[in-house]
Image: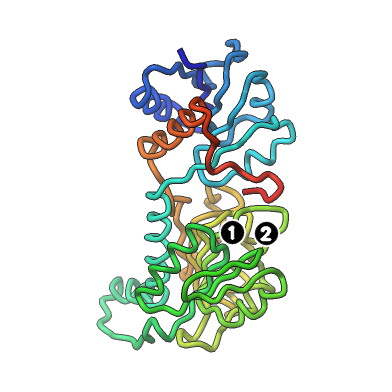
Amino acid sequence: MPSPVLIAVDGPTASVWHDEFRRAAPEREYRVWNAAQGEALDEIVYACVWRPPAGLLARLPRLQVIFNLAAGVDPLLADPTLPDVPIVRTVHPNLTMRMVEYVVLHVLMHHRGQRTYDAQQRDRVWHGHEHPAASEVTVGIMGVGAIGTAIAAVLRQIGYNVIGWSRTPKTMPGVEVHAGPGGLDAFLAHTEILVCLLPHTRDTEGIVNLPLLRRLKHDGALGGAYLINAGRGKLQVDADILAALDQGAIAGASLDVFPVEPLPPENPLWGHPNVIVTPHNAGDLSPPVLVQGVLQQMRRREQGLPLEHVVDRTRGY
């Protein structure tokens, strides 16, 4: 029988993950961390985790692979006792398409002024507004990996002018990509709708701040700049986003992630009329979809094949 798998998931969904793993691969033995407290963990080779308790993974002497049950690995890497074993990220075509759906939806909502029409509907006001064509609007994507590339392709198909920014030089068909700190000013100066998809690292923490937002293009076809953050919460400074809104540096924002989650009820972003708050579900996928990918990586390892989507700890993603 294969070695037992530990499931350590913060929150009530641990049992859901356990049930789905058992349904998909009943030949394996699974232990849920909350239920496993006090049990011997010496046999655990695989750990499937999301925000596991600090120090837990260091207590698994035979641990060989950590499977992160979400795209972001920064909570894992923050544990100073994390064992030096491969960390495999969650990657799935459906995850990419859900992110595409989210970003395209919010680009269109800001471009076509949907918040204005929502307010008019509440007040029973029948009044149209002029909106520029997509070809007159520039969307700038910070983080042009697989997800950013897919989003850029769909936005270009709709007609938007798309540019990108990356930590290192990259090429994308039909997209001008700026790179590194030296390319950031030119990227921001042409961007009317900023889409942030960056990973959370030491270099990117707090990058979406007031000085950055002030450098966006404010005199373009939209008559203002907009922010969409579907990357990581710690990329943004909430107080700076509010300040940017109050100062007119940005005209609106769609925020799916936050430095503190769940977003506290007293956070003023909840009630700001030009902010759309979503509960970190831009790329949300259910356990049945993701479990198959995790099991596939387990089988690859057991067949002597290299693991895929392994995190580079030096980069943080």
Q: Quadrant of residue 24?
A: top left
The circle drawn on residue 204 is: 2
Give me the residue at 65% from left, 31% from top: 85
* Of the pair 86 and 131, the residue shown nearer to us: 86
> Do tag 1 and tag 2 residues touch (Cβ < 8 Å)?
yes
Name the residue: 64% across, 79% down.
215
Looking at the picture, how far across and down is residue 50, in whole percent? 54, 36
**Direction from residue 83 to residue 292 in the image, left or right:** left
Given residues 170 and 274, the one toward you in this image is 170
Residue 198's tag is 1
- Residue most extreme to the front: 304
Residue type at mark 2? Answer: Thr
Q: Position of residue 189 (x, y in %)?
A: 61, 82
Give the percent coordinates (x, y) of residue 22.
38, 22
Q: Identify the image quadrant of residue 135.
A: bottom left
Q: Is residue 238 left or right of residue 295?
A: right
Q: Earlier in the sequence, mark 1 or mark 2?
A: 1
